[in-house]
Amino acid sequence: MKNTTGFNIASIRKDFPILNSKVNGKQLIYFDNAATAQTPKVVIDSIVSYYSTLNANIHRGAHYLSQKATEAYESTRRKFQQHLNAKNSSEIIFTSGTTHSINLVANGFTNLLKSGDEIIVSHLEHHSNIVPWQMLCEKTGAIMKIIPMNHDGELIFSEYEKLLSNKTKVVFVNHVSNALGTINPVKKIISKAHEFGAAVLIDGAQALPHFEVDVKDLNADFYVASAHKFYGPTGVGILYGKEKWLDKLPPYQGGGEMIDEVTFEKTTYAKLPNKFEAGTPNISGVIASGIAIDYINNIGLKKILKYENVLLKYATEKLLEIDEIKIYGNTDNKTSVISFNLGNIHHYDIGSIIDNEGIAVRTGHHCAQPIMDYYKIPGTIRLSLSFYNTKEEIDSLISAIIVAKKMLS
Amino acid sequence: MFNDWTEKYEYIIDLGKSLPVINDAFKTSDNTIKGCQSKVWLYAEYINNKLIFTADSDAIITKGIIAILIRVFSNQSPKDIVDAKADFIEEIGLKQHLSQTRANGLSSMIKQIKLYAVGYLNK
């Protein structure tokens, strides 16, 4: 089945073994991609292959396997450097996920902030990009300011400009809202913050699966993401940081690998990136994340985005044909995420009913309670589409929602 | 017992509609069960050595599931409630609502019912 966007969907679906699964006796229809994207066979194979042929600890040992594993791990770092267009590969730190990356940075600012300093967050953040900074405020006495959102789910830029001052030290905003799909104008946000000398962290967890990101062009100080959102394994995160900022931050964890010299009197720390990679990392996972990046680059992110936008448009139109559907986040500039409710029916009820038809969607507040509070709702049903989804699957979802509506009304 | 899932869920939804609803005055944060994706309130009264439960939820399927629990546990002595096994949930095919996900709170509901019973054990 060829489509106008130029890639063969049937062949792409064959790359993902799980898409053949049956759930509750029905063919799985997976629409929870913003929570975790499914894993292509090449990525799964790379994990098997690592443990079958390459398994050894890295950066230590003169033996053959250790050197091979180190090469594979470090070449993955260079792969991410290229993919994100970072200046140096030492600016890429591997972590356990976006949450870990943000905690590492937020914790690192503990000694760089003083009471009365200000940090700025957006109303559209995932709890992971709120709570670590609240903890930082508790430790330092810094004050958190919030960029407000409008009814379409967009940040109000003019209000952001008013929040900035010489007191602003850090701004942290997601590139794409996980709950609504809004793509935020991060380049503009960064450039404004830099006028006041503030550092900017961009949470790109929901961006990397969908489009190309160039940290040099954005001029981001920190850019963070999770491999399992871009078709890699769970337990691997990326932290890009400009060298000048990573040098300023203290190590997050102490342990092996991150040291230069250790005596009982004093330890000196390793240079970047090892300073932030204490202990044995998730070697197989990191290598597999690089394979995931190769996989999406082989298809082409431009093609992926084009096809996902076709699905987004189709699903939005089909959903709106159902009476009483309300979609939250109506900006023109969004990824393939649709957050919605149906009349007064609780999102959990809809989610439970359509699960019986083998359809996986996310229901709830999506770890973004401030957004739900803004709309005065307890949660939504979130449909998040990937390039392996099809219009036929969307049709099945629509039928299941109509059944659910009938049962629940 | 049921031919397909729709019958089962229609039954749960009907049960939800028939749930003995908690008095609004008792819909307090103290009576809220945490850990459920939908809001759940549960209230217990101790009458003639037995616990009487009333409850409510903003989701109808959740209400139906609480109705099943109340049918089993309400109007029993605290000791019987504490001693009761809750494995019937699995037998009637509601296991998916038991799983320990962020989404869900059937196990929290059973725990809260048992906690009420423990509280009244020595009264």
Image (cartoon, rainbow, N blue to C red):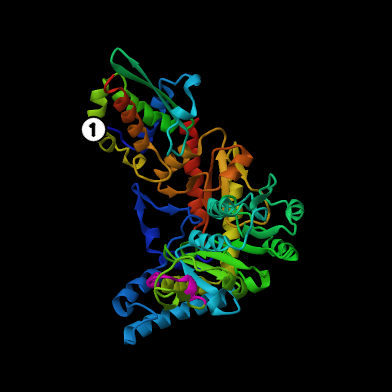
In the image, what residue occupies the spot 34% across and 46% down?
Answer: A24
Establish if A90 lies above or below A380: below
Q: Quadrant of residue A379?
A: top right
Residue A53, horizontal then vertical, whole percent: 31, 79
For residue A73, side relative to residue A307 (left or right): left
The answer to which of A27 and A329 lies nearer the viewer is: A329
Looking at the rendered structure, the number of numbered marks drawn on it comes to 1
Nearest the viewer among A184 and A314 is A184
Magenta residues span: A272-285
Task: Give amino acid for label 1.
Answer: Lys
Left or right of B48 in this view: A353: right
Q: Chain of mark 1?
A: B
Residue B86, percent from left and from top: 26, 33
Q: Residue at x 41, y 20 (%)?
A: B20
Few, some or many C-alpha atoms within 10 Å of disc 1 (few <14, some 14-19, many ≥20)? few
Report the residue at 70% width, 61% height from top.
A189
For mark 1, what is the residue?
A: B85
Determine the image quadrant of residue A114: bottom right
Judge left or right: residue B75 versus residue A161: left
Magenta region includes residue A195: no
- Residue furthest top in the image: B48
User: Compared to A268, does B64 lie above or below?
Assistant: above
Question: In front here: A408 or A44?
Answer: A44
Q: Quadrant of residue A284?
A: bottom left
- Residue A263 percent coordinates (x, y): 40, 76
A369 above or below B77?
below
